[in-house]
Image (tube, rainbow, N blue to C red):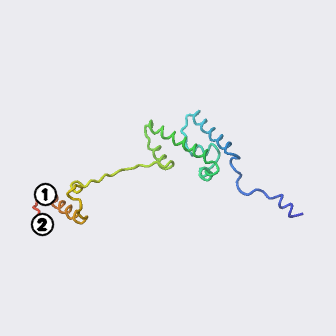
Amino acid sequence: MKSVQKIERKRKVGKPAAFDSEGEFNKAINEYFEWAEDNEKPLTVSRLCVSIGVERHYLSSHIQEYPATIKKAIQIIEADKAERLCTARNPVGLIFDLKNNHGWLDESRIEHKLNGFLHLENEGKSIEDLQRESIGLAEKIIANRAGTPVPSQN
């Protein structure tokens, strides 16, 4: 008899699920979006989590369970931030958030040209020959700026 009583007394282990279905989860998210619009508040993932009663890591840990709902919610929040970026007086906070929470990047492109060394006359020359020529040219430029003659290398 004791073993039956112990089984009956067993309770479920762990925290109960925050939502019973994706529909319930989606409804809670939409209620947050409506609240934010009605109160003219910016959309944020943090405020979304507070509003629906979950911790921030809940979204990433339940992406397999509710993929469409979570991805769409994050896309809507990102789009709101991108739109506000266009009209913000000081967009630094938005830029920081988009970089750190939505994968945006600053990219710089450096274009390097080797004037004079990419001509057809240099085709077929080895890298070592081109390096010697560029070093010789650099020495001539430095000497010219310093006002000293450069010995010829014949």
The disc at residue 153 is 2
- In-image side of 33 versus 7 (left or right): left
Q: Residue furthest right?
A: 1
- In-image side of 33 versus 129 (left or right): right
State yes or no: discs 2 and 1 in contact (Cβ < 8 Å): no
Rendered location of residue 126, percent (x, y): 24, 65
- In-image side of 55 versus 2 (left or right): left
The disc at residue 80 is none
Q: Residue at label 1?
A: 144
Name the amino acid type tagged 1. Answer: Asn
Sequence-wise, the earlier of marks 2 and 1 is 1
Rendered location of residue 22, percent (x, y): 67, 45
Q: Residue furthest top?
A: 38
Number of numbered discs on residues:
2
Mark 2 Cα shell of 10 Å, populated few (<14), some (14-19), many (≥20): few
- In-image side of 90 versus 18 (left or right): left
- Closer mark to the observer between disc 2 and disc 1: 2
Residue in the foreground of this view, choosing between 4 and 21: 21
Which structural element holds mark 1? Answer: helix
Name the amino acid type tagged 2. Answer: Gln
Mark 1 Cα shell of 10 Å, populated few (<14), some (14-19), many (≥20): few
**If the image is split into quadrants, where does the N terminus sit?**
bottom right
Q: Is residue 22 above or below residue 135?
A: above
Tell me which residue sits at (10%, 64%) in the image.
152
Q: How far separated are the C-alphas under marks 2 and 1?
A: 16 Å
Q: Quadrant of residue 87?
A: top left
Residue in the foreground of this view, choosing between 82 and 69: 69
Which structural element holds mark 2? Answer: loop
Tell me which residue sits at (73%, 57%) in the image.
13
**If the image is split into quadrants, where does the C terminus sit?**
bottom left
Rendered location of residue 24, percent (x, y): 68, 42
